[in-house]
Image (cartoon, helix red, strand yellow):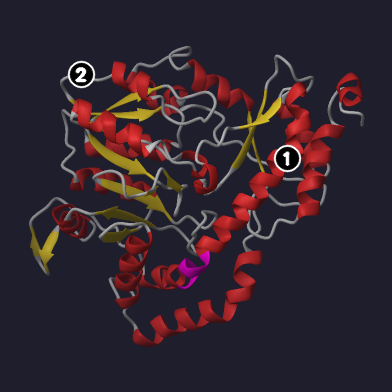
Amino acid sequence: MNNTSIRIPFVDLQLQHQPIQAQLQNAIQAVLEKGDFVLGQSLQDFEAAFAAASGTEYGVGVASGTDAITLGLQACNIEPGDEVILPANTFVATLIGVLRTGAKPVLVDCDERTALIDLQAAQKAITPKTKAIIPVHLYGQMVSPKQLLDFSNTYKLLIFEDAAQAHLAQREGYLAGSVGKAAAFSFYPSKNLGAFGDGGIVLTRDLDVAEKMSRLRNYGASQKYVHVEFGTNSRLDTLQAAVLLQKLPYLPSWNQQRLRIAQQYDTELAPLAPCGITPIENHSNQGHAYHLYVIRIDDSTSAIERQQLQEQLANMGIQTGIHYPIPCHLQPAFTNLGYKIGDFPHAEKLAQQILSLPMYPGLTNSQIQEVIAAIALNLRADQQKLLCI
C-alpha cells in the first residue's frame, strides 16, 4: 500500500469552491427556506440557463448522466428492435443507457489519434435496423460536427450526443449538445461543471423531445396522477440545480484555465515524444474543454510501461488516472453481446497505453512542470541522455 502523501492530486475541487463558497451556501439556504426540493424554481432556472449557454432551446434535468442517456434516447423514440451505433472506447454508462432502452448496441472502433469514434468504422456497421449514432465527446473534445451531420444526412440516422465530459466544448462553430436531436450531460462532482452529488441533463431543440423527457423523468406523468408514459423517478434535485446555477457563470473561465494547462502540458511533453510519450491529439483547437488530459505511453518505443509509470508517479505524490482500462466490449457484464478480443484494436491498444494527468482549474505552472519532470525522471537512463537530463 502506498502511504506517500499526495502533493499533486488528480482533481482538487476546493480550488473552485472556496472562492464562491458564500454564493453556494446562500443558494442552498434559499432552497432550504423555500422548501421546493423537487422540481423547484432553481431547477427550472438552471435548465433554461444551461440550455442557452449550450446553444439549445430546452433542458430537462435528471438524476444522473446515465439516466440522461437512457431517458434521452427513449424521448427520441429509440426502442426495442432498433440498433444504435456507439464507440467501444467510452465509459460503460453510454452502453448501459442503450441497453436500458431495449435497443441493440452496435459497437465500433475509435480513431487511435483522438480516441473519438471512427465514423468510417461506423459506416460499415450500418444495417437496415440502425436508427441512431451516439458520438461520445470524449475527454472534452467534440466529434467533428460537420462530419457527423454529413454522416447523419447520408444515412438518415438520428444523432444523440454523449456530452458527459464536454460542457461548453466547441468545434467548427458548434457547441456540445447543439449538434444532434438531443444530448446527455453529466454533473458528477469532478466534471467541468459538477454538482455536489450525481446529476444530469438532456438538451434538445425539439419541444416534443423535451416534453416527453419531462414526463419520463417524473413517472411518465403529463399531469399529477395522469401517467401517459412508462416513466421513472429521475429528477435533478433543486438543491443540486441551485449549486450548478451558481457555478455556471464561472464555467467559461474554468474551461479556459483547463485549455491553458493543456497547452503547457503539450509544450512540456514535446521533448518526450521520441521516448514514446505523447498526448491524445487535439483537433478542436481552442474549443477542447479538457475534462481530462490524456497521454499515451507507447510500449514499442518507451522504456517504461504505463503501470510502472503510474506507480512511480504515485510514489512521488502525483495522482493519475486511467480512462478507461477495459473497453466496453471486454467488460465481463457484456459478454452476451458477442464481442471478443481483437474486434476493436484501436480501443484495445489505447486501453493499454493511456494515462490521465492531473487536470483542474488552479493547477499551477510549477505543478505542471513537476509532473512532466517526474515522468522524464522515470525514463530509462539512455532515454534520459536523449533528453539531456
Q: Main secondary structure of the magenta part?
A: helix
Q: Earlier in the sequence, mark 1 or mark 2?
A: 2
Q: Does residue 249 show up magenta in the picture?
A: yes
On the rendered image, what quadrant is the N terminus found in?
top right
- Residue 7 can be seen in this image: no
Badge 1: residue crowd in 10 Å (few <14, some 14–19, many ≥20) = few
| Up-down relation of residue 180 to residue 116 (above or below) | below
Question: Residue 282 falls in which quadrant of the image?
Answer: top right
The question of residue 266 being in magenta is answered with no
Q: In x, y percent, where is residue 53?
A: 38, 62
Give the class, few, some or many, for how many residues have Cα within 10 Å of label 2's Cα (few <14, many ≥20).
Answer: few
Label 2 belongs to which residue?
127
* Numbered circle sitting on residue 310: none
Give the amino acid at mark 1: Thr
Label 1: state its secondary structure.
helix
Q: Which mark is residue 267?
A: 1
Instruction: Please name the residue shown 71% across and 46% down the image.
Output: 264
x and y, in percent, of residue 236 in the image? 34, 63
**Eyeballing the image, is 61 above or below 319?**
below
Q: Nearer the viewer, mark 1 or mark 2?
A: 1
| Magenta span | 246-250
